[in-house]
């Protein structure tokens, strides 16, 4: 098992970051890849590397088959939303004004 905080190494063995997340489906036992950052601040953008570029997994580290240049070109990781935005849209009001005070009030459970 890969753990958060393990070192991520490029093809030459140089550390390029630290594991942030393991992506995939635990219930289906599918390993999709990892996200990693440089171990800096919370503002650091995680990068995603697909499982096919993981060359080796050793206790405390994950080795990639990518050069440092290839690692630097990896896309930033954007976590998949749990619900499509269309599902989060408010229901249209029926019959005029909402008796509960409108969308703001509904979000914060307050009446006007």
Image (tube, rainbow, N blue to C red):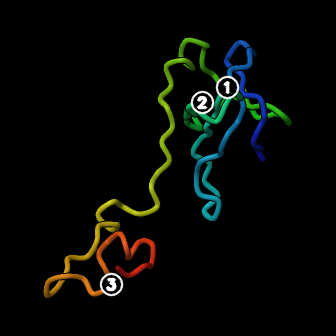
| Quadrant of the image occupied by residue 42 | top right
Q: Residues within 10 Å of mark 2 (few under 14, many from 20)?
A: few
Label whose residue precedes the other's in the sequence (1 or 3): 1
Element under disc 3 = loop
Q: Which residue is mark 1?
A: 38
Q: Which residue is mark 3?
A: 100
Q: Residues within 10 Å of mark 1 (few under 14, many from 20)?
A: some
| Residue at the spot 57% in from the left edge and 20% down from the top edge | 71
Measured from the top left, where is residue 101 in percent x and y?
31, 79
Element under disc 2 = loop
| Residue at the spot 59% in from the left edge and 57% down from the top edge | 25
Q: Is residue 95 left or right of residue 102?
A: left
Label whose residue precedes the other's in the sequence (2 or 3): 2
Alpha-carbon span between mark 1 and mark 3: 47 Å
Q: Nearer the viewer, mark 2 or mark 3?
A: 3
Q: Which residue is mark 2?
A: 44
Q: Nearer the viewer, mark 2 or mark 1?
A: 2
Q: Which label number is shown at residue 52?
A: none
Measured from the top left, where is residue 30 in percent x and y?
60, 53
65 over 42 or under it: above or below: above
């Amino acid at each position: 098992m890969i753990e958060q905080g393990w070192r991520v190494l490029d093809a030459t063995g140089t550390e390029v970051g630290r594991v942030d997340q393991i992506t995939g489906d635990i219930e289906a036992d599918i390993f999709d890849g990892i996200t990693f950052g440089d171990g800096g601040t919370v503002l650091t953008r995680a990068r995603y590397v697909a499982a096919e570029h993981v060359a080796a997994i050793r206790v405390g580290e994950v080795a990639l088959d990518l050069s440092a240049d290839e690692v630097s070109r990896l896309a930033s990781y954007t976590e998949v939303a749990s619900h499509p935005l269309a599902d989060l849209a408010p229901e249209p009001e029926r019959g005029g004004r909402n008796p509960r005070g409108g969308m703001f009030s509904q979000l914060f459970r307050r009446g006007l």
